[in-house]
Amino acid sequence: MLNPIPSKLPQAGLSIFAKMTALAQQYQAINLAQGFPDFAPPEQLFQFLNEAVESGFNQYAPMPGLLMLRQQIASRLENRYQLKANIDDDITVTAGATQAIYTIISAFIRPGDKVLIFEPAYDSYGPAVLVNGVSQFTSDSNYQIFSIPWTQLESMLQKGKIRMILINNPHNPAGRILHQEDMLRFEKLAVQYDVLWVWDEVYDMLVFDSKPHWSALHYPEIMKSSIVTFSMGKTLHNTGWKIGYTIAKAELTKEIRKVHQFLVFSVNTPAQYAIAKFMESYPEFINELPQFYQHKRDFFFKEMKHPDFEWLPCEGSYFALARFKNPEQLSDAVFAEQLVANKKVATIPISAFYHDGYDPGIVRFCFAKKEDTIKEAATQLLK
């Protein structure tokens, strides 16, 4: 009899997103847990998707991505970030940003290396590191103001223990952004230390109150040792299409593609065509996203006033955090389960974003929803 095969992720089970979505379905609750819109993508995308299929774009795309999409991505990056990306050597289209980050980690990290992740952190980062046989360092950022623990970070770098650093900006779940002074400090560290920087900037267009998004792309010294990931799904309200991309210097991109070609080889061809045509035909759509989601954020906070919730600031992303009153000393996971069962509103407990289950008594809500959905959720919570 074959001996049991040891798990590479022994602590991993059903993700918190799948669990809370299943509970939302079980209790017929409003799902403010999983991060996806409940409204449709732009209708023109569907027309371009049909056009792609009918025009014969149904076979494998080139491994780096359709040329027409890479051209549109390069145009967007130059217009927004003044970065002139080489469409042949610097841009790789991926099956979403999660696959991009997994591919990056697999391409560059070896057993014995250590990866620094600032927590709370998106839940795929840790498993992607661990499954590649790598030691994972975690360092808590301040979940209320998302400040980087600079002294701790510099101490780790001085000891030469860190091979890669993952940074999420705008931040999920904290809803905070990095500011120019933060990026200038990162720039000094990037020049001083031999570290690979991975920037998850999937919410780059979701920054509010006229604040700028300070991307790694703004800083040539940072980009010498950096890879930046983006998501068209977050930008075009079509998360199920799973189209993302990476931006990096040619020598880094070359290594990413070595793994990418054997992991997925290429990405959905009709979807790439449709997105490229949409970006070319409707450039104003992406530029108007900050105002679109700021309106949703403001409407959400106006409607969701509740005596049991203290709302934390949201500068970016489409997530809002609430500290909940907790006289019964419930864990955030139990509180979230009771909320979906009793109030018919599903959220995500923040402990899911910590490797050790640290529980600050906070839950995450997604406000990428129709106004009617938000109003109904507010009504349910006040019952």
Image: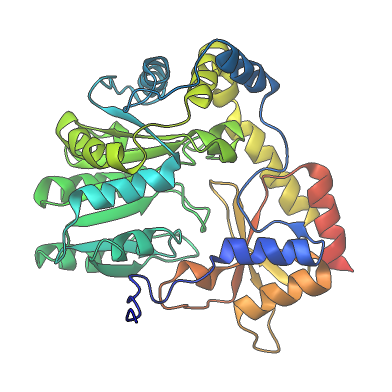
Give how far across and how far down residue 289 sits, in percent. Answer: 59, 31
Answer with left or right where residue 258 lies relative to residue 241: left
Residue 347 visible to an observer of this rendering: no
Answer with left or right where residue 153 lies relative to residue 235: left
Give how far across and how far down residue 24 sits, in percent. Answer: 74, 63
Q: Is residue 1 above or below residue 318?
A: below
Q: Is residue 61 above or below residue 334?
A: above
Q: Is residue 257 above or below residue 32?
A: above
Residue at x 86% of width, y 67% of height: 382
Residue at x 34% of width, y 50% of height: 102
Residue at x 38% of width, y 58% of height: 125
Name the quadrant of the N terminus. Answer: bottom left
Query: Which residue is nearer to you in this view: 135 or 146?
Result: 135
Give how far across and how far down residue 212 sits, in percent. Answer: 45, 36
Q: Quadrant of residue 30?
A: bottom right
Name the quadrant of the C terminus. Answer: bottom right
Q: Residue furthest front?
A: 1
Residue 24 visible to an observer of this rendering: yes
Q: Residue furthest bottom?
A: 328
Answer with left or right where residue 367 lies relative to residue 70: right
